[in-house]
Amino acid sequence: MAVINKDVIIVGGGAGGLAAAVELRKQGIEDILIIEREKELGGILRQCIHDGFGLTRFKETLSGPEYAQRFIDEVDKLGIDYLTDTTVLEITSDKRITSVSKDGLNEYQAKAIVLTMGCRERTRGALSIPGSRPTGIYTAGVAQMYVNLKNTMVGRDVMILGSGDIGLIMARRLTLEGANVHAVFARGDTPRGLPRNVEQCLNDYNIPLYLSHNVTQIHGKNRLEGITISEVGKDNAPIPGTEKYYPCDTLILSVGLIPENELSLKAGVTLDNRTKGAYVDENYQTNVEGIFAAGNVLHVHDLVDFVSIEAEKLADAVVEYVKNNSLPECPIVVETDKMINYTIPQKISGNRDVSLSFRVKKNVKNVTLQVLQDGETIYKKKLKKAITSEMEQIRLKKDLFKSRSNIKVVITV
Amino acid sequence: MDRIYDFTIIGAGVVGNAVARELSRYLLDGSKEVNMAVLEKELDVVCETSGRNSGVLHAGFNNKPGSKMAKFCVEGNLEFDQVAKELDIPFVRTGKVVVGFDDDDMKQLLKSKEQGDMNGCPGLEIIDKKRLNELAQNVGGEFAMYSPMTGIMDPFDYTIALAENAYDNGVEYYFGDAVEDINRVNELYIIKTKKKTYKAKWIINCAGLNSDKISKMLGIDGYEIYPCRGEYIILDKKMGEYLNMPVYPVVNPKQGGLGIHLTPSVDGNVFIGPSADYLDCCDDYSATKPVIDMLFEEGKKLLPYIKREYFIRNFSGIRPKLTNKGGYEDFVIEARDEAPNTVNLVGIESPGLTSATPIGREVVRLIKEKTLLRENPNFNPFRKAQVVFHKQPIDVQRKLIEKDPNYGEIVCRCETITKAEVLNAINNPLGVDTVTGIKYRCRCMMGRCQGGYCQTRVTELIQDVKHKKREEILYNREGSYMFTGKVRG
């Protein structure tokens, strides 16, 4: 079968892929193909029927499907090609893509590939939660899909482990659909989800949130019958003697997302162990030339708005790459101190203005953020507060950089 | 009710199914066709010990010379290429290393080798560190015993294939039907189960963890099964690249098992385990915190690359042991006078998976001692597996999609399982419709996302194909409902 040539192939038609496609077309790239495995474009937004999306991007609050539709309408208006019900089986480092659908197998050669595959949920197995093996334990996203898209109720007496946003959203959702959501437990001492979700999904419905707690035992042979919860200490280890039994038939896990990089790895893309996403430069280019990544496949975002904005920035670089067949070198590594979890990008050129996104390791107040190069402070900013659940962003002007030495982002109290 | 089976097998684990298959090669004198039923308390075959193990085809050096364990294990090992070919199941003779670190280990290894040589395991050799590193890179240990005949298989595949082949040869299967009482009236066995009553001329007890209870029902006293749980951790396929063969520590003879080992699966995952803990009851498949931590530490000794981020699932299996003091008691396979027309199998633990087919033949031999069996002229030893799309060459894949577009729809992304394969699994010949039944038959939901992507699709397909309501979908056992109904409407 003949190989089909494309300028840009976008793997995944969710928030990131759609925004990248629209922006690429607007900047003059004609030959684009989005490949989406689901029946429709939109990605995970399709099952996020709650509102709160778009405040940053559109200055109004939209539901997930509405937010996605804004982009899908543009894709249609601009006549961007896309395939649904089509799964990418393989991506190679020389930018070949094999896909499969009911119409058969296809092989493509792209000038540039944009990775926007999103993420998957961490499961009970990944956490090794001890206890018996009954049904009734769902990850929050799976429960959300059953309830919102499949008209299927997963249970009646619900406990939630983890304070991630999807777990909080599902606490409200299941309550509204008639389930008894008894409590949310989370291992950390601060909620991982957004403050507004704690307020609107738990407090408004009188659902208690117990921080520094963990599920230490699962009970029930066939269907879940209850869970044992223990308080945990600073080392996250359960404190003996604090065990409490709670009967329930359903446990929802909202315990983290993992960028879905299986295809990227096969293509030779190197991942950052901190983000589990690709190691990228300021062009969102991975270590494999011509393969770019943005959105949740790069690092887990708090808001879809930021996914769209990141993908649009990626598009700028992809346009330049497709037109010039090269991008500026990015020799400067962005290092971090122990207060900072990671930055995106991890490498910069020093020749252009650049936005650095970062996440702190723990919640802090009244701190100073500094960027150091060659032992000197080249940027300084006071932060009233920074919390783990919200991404911070700084903009570094190109004339700040005095050399091509690595820079280091540090936070001091 | 008036039907009288020639043979009734209690238990549809690997042994029950191997017995069913071996026995379906014959007809009881006077019968024109296979007239046999397998009664299983669970909703599928392979729900307990048979599927919950390392999936290793043992070579037979761990068992006492002269024991049934040694004899059947070696036999089962040597013939498995043929068995796997007939049943169309994946099987790799990977070889295995038992690694040692000190002088005591060396002594134990030399003992194992001597024992293996006596049992007739071909090719055992003690190897030095250099050779060990050549054979199994990345693995810890100063020296090892290498067993070239050891292999790996998928115990789900093997058991299901045995059952499907037996079914094709006329054996009937009844699921969710626990045996509650057995009586002998007018030379016939009356078997009262949860659902109904069966009559049979012969009973073969293959009840595994419950084989002592069935023994008692048959009038054979004196057996007690001591359930001994082994927990495992399943690691991501990324770890599979580091391990090309099972790696075992030197056996501690006081333990109930073979020690914490690492096993690659035929599908490319790695298992760490099993632990060995005696239980009070025989159906507690829990995972426990101290064991999970211990498995992780022990696993790292054998393969330093193991990280927690590669955990994808825990599982455990329970050994039906005849001793509560560690070590092994030999298989019981007997036709006793106080229970005429029965074959009683008790304590079939490891190496039961490897020994299953030879055990099946042994059952036939014992029956032949008591009654006339004629060859079944219609017996067909071959069973065809369903197509695994991702293992096909690209031109075959194209043809498959042309013929059935469902092969072009990926349902399970981690394992690359197509909708056609899921539908084939749902339409399995035994009529099993539990979620795990579908999972075991096509590997959907077995990948690193553990069904995050495909579970909703798989349950929906079961609903559609089997015309079930949401709340009727069961995960594995009765009572393991997944949904409480519709959200609305």
Image (tube, coloured by chain):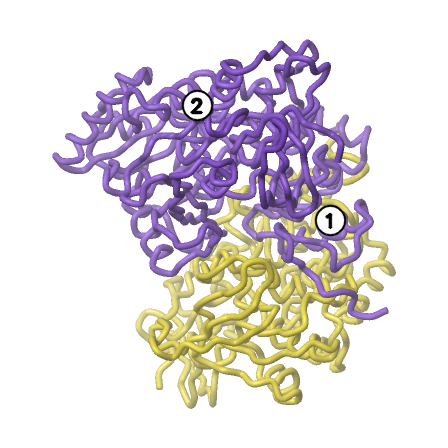
Chain colours: A yellow, B purple
* Left/right of residue B298 with respect to residue B58 in the rendered view: left
Q: Dot 1, crowdedness within 10 Å: few (<14), some or many (≥20)?
A: many
Q: CA distance from mark 2 to mark 1?
A: 40 Å
Dot 1 amino acid type: Ile
Quadrant location of residue B470?
bottom right
Nearer to the camera, A118 or B446:
B446
Residue A248 badge:
none
Dot 2 amino acid type: Arg
Q: Residue B231, how many percent across, how many down?
A: 41, 49
Quadrant location of residue B179?
top right
Nearer to the camera, A7 or B85:
B85
Q: Chain of mark 2?
A: B
Image quarter (top left, top right, bottom left or bottom right) of the N terminus of chain B: top right
Helix, strand or loop at mark 2: loop
Residue A333 drawn above or below residue B300: below
Residue A243 drawn above or below residue B91: below
Residue at point 26% right, 17% down? B117
* Left/right of residue B133 with respect to residue B4 in the rendered view: left
Q: Which residue is mark 1?
A: A35
Residue B93 badge:
2
Residue at point 56% right, 14% down? B371
Q: Residue B429, how many percent across, how many down?
A: 72, 32
* Left/right of residue B317 with respect to residue B1 in the rendered view: left
> Disc 2 vs disc 1: which is toward the camera?
2
Residue at point 70% right, 38% down? B425
Residue B203 drawn above or below residue B301: above
Residue at point 33% right, 46% down? B299
Q: Chain of mark 1?
A: A
Helix, strand or loop at mark 1: strand
Q: Residue B340, how many percent across, how many down?
A: 52, 26
Q: Residue A236, how many percent across, how many down?
A: 37, 72
Q: Is residue A377 visible?
A: yes
